[in-house]
Image: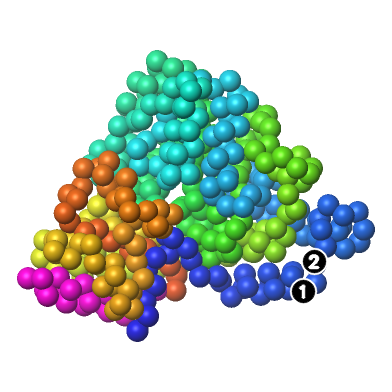
Amino acid sequence: MQVYFDNAATTPLDPEVIQIMTETMQEHFGNPSSIHAHGRQAKTIVEKARKTVAGLLKASPSEIFFTSGGTEADNMAIVRSIMDLGITHAITSPLEHHAVLHTLEEMAQGDRIQLDFVRVDAQGQVDLEHLQTLLSKNPRTFVSLMHANNEISTLTDIHKVSEICQAFDAVFHSDTVQTMGHYVHDLSTLQIDFLTGAAHKFHGPKGVGFIYINGKNKIRPLLYGGAQERNMRGGTENVYGIVGLAKALELCYQHMDEHRIHIQGLKDYMRAALLENIPGITFNGNTGAEDSLYTVLNVSLPCTEIADMLLFSLDIAGISASGGSACSSGSQLGSHVLEALGADPDRPSVRFSFSKYNTTEEIDFVVNKLKEICESQG
């Protein structure tokens, strides 16, 4: 049996997404920048996709810009804000994705900006009082806080963060890569400057994402070249990917409630089964339905003697999971998120992440295998 529980790393393409992308590849191969009929057809398709995404997020199409993915989108928000909006101070958390952390750390080199880290508790919850304290000392700050942590699932109330940022005239960016397509993002009510997403996290294709840039912010491109994306991103548009992104997001919004109920049920089922079958098991981050991302469950196991081999053992058993963020899977370093939380380095942690395609039968299979692995070390 082959089981895929690494949907926080990437999700399988929805068949309807594959279909519309294939049709686009076959019928609309023109360059959107060309003025002839083939180019105009491709341009029309890109703009239709932009309107779809903007409509779902309740934003203006002029505020949506397509990118190569979430990393580029995060980089664009951070670098251009600091370069173009008069930013000399930034605040983030130690739990952010490296697309945010490494970019801000790079910008902090040479005293370009002062970088502060807001405190988080043992579950990864941001200390909003500390955020206010930091902002009171440095108004007009760039604040970057993700909506949901990709490793431990803890949610941040970005509406509350937005209110705090508004009070101090701060520029607010949120990496919503893990929650896009899983939660409603209503940008007519959420006052935010930058928001980012990546298609492959919600059953769309890899290599395409987007950034929402609030119309009040005037920034320059991150990538220079042609006049694509209304002079905001040089490079020929990934027409097939953009079409796939829009279709995937549209499907997510159409079926969001039913998928949430199904996936939350899987998470709750697995948590209960693990507690029943593996003594000493604990969980990293928040696990409650109200304060955690329902697609992710981070498990801390007591079988310490096999810590280095646990993911390998699961893989041999036909189970795909992650020890943390897939974006750093090639690194020999441990999870910076779990380290920041003070997690026991001797206990192996596994991130299981679910999608609409997973089943309780798959969970039973995983729990039994984990039980066997841990009991073999008993």
**372 falls in the magenta region:** yes
Q: Are marks 2 and 1 in contact (CB under 8 Å)?
A: yes
Residue 55: image x %, image y %?
Answer: 65, 51
| On screen, residue 372 above or below 208 | below
Find residue 62 and report its horizontal and vertical position in percent.
Answer: 72, 42
What amino acid does circle 2 point to?
Answer: Phe
Q: Which residue is mark 1?
A: 26
The residue to which callout 2 is attached is 29
The residue lying toward the viewer, choosing from 370 and 98, is 98
Task: Give the farthest residue toward the left.
Answer: 378
Q: Seen in the image, is 310 located left or right of residue 281?
A: right
The residues colored magenta run: 358-378
Percent position (x, y) of residue 304?
14, 61
Residue located at (40% from left, 57% from top): 330
Image quarter (top left, top right, bottom left or bottom right) of the C terminus: bottom left
Residue at the spot 40% in from the left edge and 42% down from the top edge = 96
